[in-house]
Image: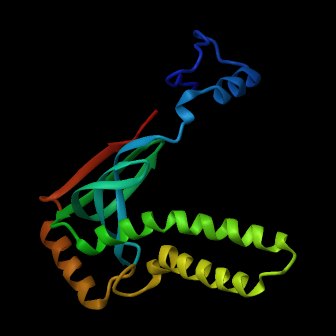
Amino acid sequence: MWRLQAGQRSFGSRCPSPFEAVISALYNPTMAAIAFGKRLLGRVDSVRSKYHVATLFWHFCYLPLIPLGSYIVLEHSMSGMTMTFRGIRIPVSIKSWAIAWLRTLLVFPLVMAVVGLITFPLEGGKYMKGYFFLIAIFVLISFLMFGLYLVPGIGRATVARQTTIANIVNKSLGANTVMVSTFDMHN
C-alpha cells in the first residue's frame, strides 16, 4: 500500500505511476541525515543468539547522548524506523555504555582511513611506509569496531556471565519483561 510520508506530494486516492513515485522519493525532505530518538546501542554479552545486553540511549544522529537503562534483550525487530524489543531491565551496564561510545567515536577515524587508503595510491607510490602504517591503522580500527563482537568477555559472554544472565532471565521471565517500541524522528 502506498503511504504518504511527510513532505511528499499527495496523489489523492489513486496509486502513483512508477515515474511519479521515483520523482516524489527523490524530492522527499525526510531523507535528510538528522535523526533523533531512542535506540539500543552497545550490544555486548551475547549468549548463543538467544539474548544479549544492550543500553537504550536517547541519541542524536546515532550519537548516544543519555543512557536510559540497560536491558537483557530477548528479542528485537525493526519495522521502518520503529524498533521493538522485549527485554529485562538491569542496572546500567558500563561495558555496554563504553562499547556504544567506542563504536560511535571510531566512525570518523574509520572513514578517514578509508579515504587515505583510496588516495595514497594516487600519489604514485612515494609514501609506501605511510601506506602500510595506514593499513595497520585501518585493521586496528576495524577490529575495535567489528571484531569486539567475537571477543569473549566483551561481545560474547563468558561462561560465568552467561550463567548470571541466564539466572536473571529465568527469575524474571514473564513478570519483569518489558516490551518497548522506539521511533526515530527524522528531519
Q: Nearer the viewer, residue 55 or 3?
A: 55
Give the residue displayed 44% in from the left and 65% down from the top: 105
Give the x, y percent position of residue 159: 29, 90
Can you say whether 25 is above or below 77 in the image?
above
Give the x, y percent position of residue 97: 29, 67
Quadrant housing residue 119: bottom right
Q: Residue furthest top?
A: 12
Q: Residue furthest front?
A: 126
Q: Locate residue 45 relative to residue 138 in the image: left or right.
A: left
Quadrant housing residue 44: bottom left
Q: Nearer the viewer, residue 138 or 38?
A: 138
Q: Locate residue 53 relative to residue 23 in the image: left or right.
A: left
Give the residue displayed 64% in from the left and 29% down from the top: 25
Quadrant housing residue 21: top right
Give the residue displayed 72% in from the left and 81% down from the top: 131
Give the residue displayed 77% in from the left and 73% down from the top: 120
